[in-house]
Image (tube, rainbow, N blue to C red):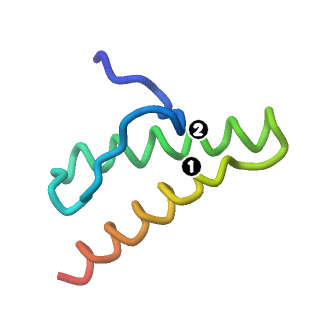
């Protein structure tokens, strides 16, 4: 597995999560969650971009669950 375990705010994030497959969406969610955890522990608060990505992923999961 070559996927990174986290996704920093500077790294690419898909513009439209609807175009991302279910498995890749789960990978992105895991990467963003790990980054969020790191930022809170190391920096005391999350980066706004990481928070936004986390929110976007939650919304996409909800949209898919509602189908």
Q: In this view, does 55 lie above or below 25?
A: below
Q: Which of marks 2 and 1 is nearer the N terminus?
A: 2
Q: In which quarter of the image is residue 16?
A: bottom left
Q: Label 2, secondary structure: give it.
A: helix
Can you say which quadrant of the picture contains the N terminus? top left
Quarter occupied by the C terminus: bottom left
- Residue at x 59%, y 56% (from the top left corner): 51
| 30 relative position to 42: left or right | left
Residue at the image point whose x is 23% and y is 72% from the top: 64
Query: Where in the figure is residue 57, as x and y percent of width and height?
Result: 40, 60
Q: Find the residue positioned furthest to the bottom.
A: 66
Q: Do the residues labelled 2 and 1 touch (CB within 8 Å)?
A: yes
Identify the residue under disc 1: 50
* Camera-side residue of 12 and 36: 12
* Image coordinates for residue 18, horizontal then vertical, percent: 19, 63
Question: From mark 2 to mark 1, how far is it between C-alphas?
Answer: 7 Å
Check disc 2 and report the residue beneath it. 35
């Amino acid at each position: 597995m070559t996927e990174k375990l986290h996704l920093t705010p500077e790294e690419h994030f898909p513009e439209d999560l609807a175009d991302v497959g279910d498995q890749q969406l789960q990978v992105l969610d895991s990467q963003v969650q790990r980054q969020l955890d790191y930022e809170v522990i190391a920096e005391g608060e999350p980066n706004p971009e990481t928070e936004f990505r986390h929110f976007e992923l939650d919304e996409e999961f909800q949209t898919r669950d509602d189908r």
